[in-house]
Image (cartoon, helix red, strand yellow):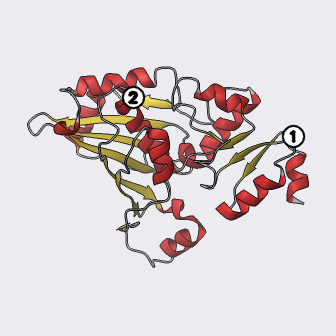
Amino acid sequence: KRASAMQEADVAILCLPDSAAIQAAEMVADMDVRVIDTSSAHRTAVGWVYGFPELCPGQSQKIAEARLVSNPGCYATGFIALSRPLIESGFIEPDKTLISPAVSGYSGGGKTMIASMKEGNLPPHFDYSLGLSHKHIPEIIMHSGLLVAPLFMPSVGMFEQGMLVRLAVPSADFSKNVTIRDVHEIYREAYRDHPMVRVCGLDEALSLQHSGHLSADGLAGQDGLEIFCFNNAKTEHFLITARLDNLGKGAAGAAVQNLNIMLGCRPNEGLNWNY
C-alpha cells in the first residue's frame, strides 16, 4: 500500500523512523516518484540532495532538479547556517572545534517526550546526549565544511516549540582579527538572496543585549530562521545565535520549502515568514 500510494504522488514526503524511511525509499528506487525524507536516514547518503536551500550558491537548483531530497535536522539547520559562512569566508579554519550549546522545545523529542513533559515527568530544563554523539553531528560535519566534530551540547526546555542554536567563539578561535561588524557582514552577504533567513541588525542585537534575554520560542509557528551577532568588546568573546522553530524551518516548514522548490512554485519561500 505504501509503495502504490507513493507511486501515485508527484512528490512523496516520508515522515517515518529511519529504518522505515530506508525501506520506503527502496520501494520506489526504480519508480518515477520524487521523495523528501524528513528522517535522519539519508542526510549523508550518496545520491541524496541535502534539503537546505540556503547552504551555498546553487543548492536550491540542486533541490529543484533532485529526485531524492533529505530534510536537514533541526539543530543541524541552525548550526550549519551559523558555521558554514564563517568557514567558507576563512574566518574559522575547518579543523577548529566549534562550541555549540543549544536548546529546543520539547516537541522535538516526539510523542514520548511530549507526553512525559505534559505529565510532569521531566525537569523544566535538562541537557541530553551527554556522550557528545548527537545524531545530527554527521550531517553537521559533512555540510558545514568542518573536518572535526563540534562540541555540541543540546538541551530541552519547558516550552513546546522553538530553539536557539549558538556558536560561542573567543576571538582567538578566528583565523584573523575580526570585528562584530565583519562577522555580521559575512552573514548578510551569505543570506542576501534567501528570504527565509533573516540576519538581524547590530542595533537590534545591542538592544537585546541591554534587555538581557532572547526568547527561544520567539519564532514558534513560523518557518524562517534568524541570526543574531553578539560580542563583548572587553573580553573579545563572540556569541552568534540562530533562532528557529524546531517544527518549522527545523522540520515541516523546511519540507514544505523543499516541496515548493521541487514543484517550481515560490522557489525560495516557505509558508509563513511574517517579517
Q: Visible in this render: residue 268?
A: no
Mark 2 neighbour density, 10 Å: few (under 14) some (14–19) many (20 or more): some
Q: Mark 1 or mark 2, which has the lower sequence index? A: 1
Disc 2 marks which residue?
Answer: 88
The residue drawn where x is 29% and y is 29% is: 91
The residue drawn where x is 86% and y is 46% is: 30
In terms of image quadrants, where is residue 126?
Answer: bottom left
Mark 1 neighbour density, 10 Å: few (under 14) some (14–19) many (20 or more): some
The amino acid type of the residue labelled 2 equals Glu
Image coordinates of residue 120 in percent, x first then y, are 45, 77
The residue drawn where x is 70% and y is 32% is: 260
Outermost left residue: 234
For this view, does 108 lie left or right of residue 11?
A: left
For this view, does 180 lie left or right of residue 141?
A: left
Question: Do residues under tags 1 and 2 come within 8 Å of each other at their CB atoms?
Answer: no
Image coordinates of residue 218 in percent, x first then y, are 43, 45
For this view, does 60 lie left or right of residue 26?
A: left
Q: Visible in this render: residue 273?
A: yes
- Give residue 32's mark: 1
The residue drawn where x is 39% and y is 23% is: 188
What is the CA distance from the residue labelled 1 to the residue labelled 2? Answer: 36 Å
Q: Above or below — where is 120 with respect to 72?
A: below
Secondary structure category for the residue under label 1: loop
Secondary structure category for the residue under label 2: helix
Q: Above or below — where is 242 with respect to 57?
A: below
The amino acid type of the residue labelled 1 equals Asp
Image coordinates of residue 273 in percent, x first then y, are 55, 34
Q: Depth check: 29 or 215 in front?
A: 29
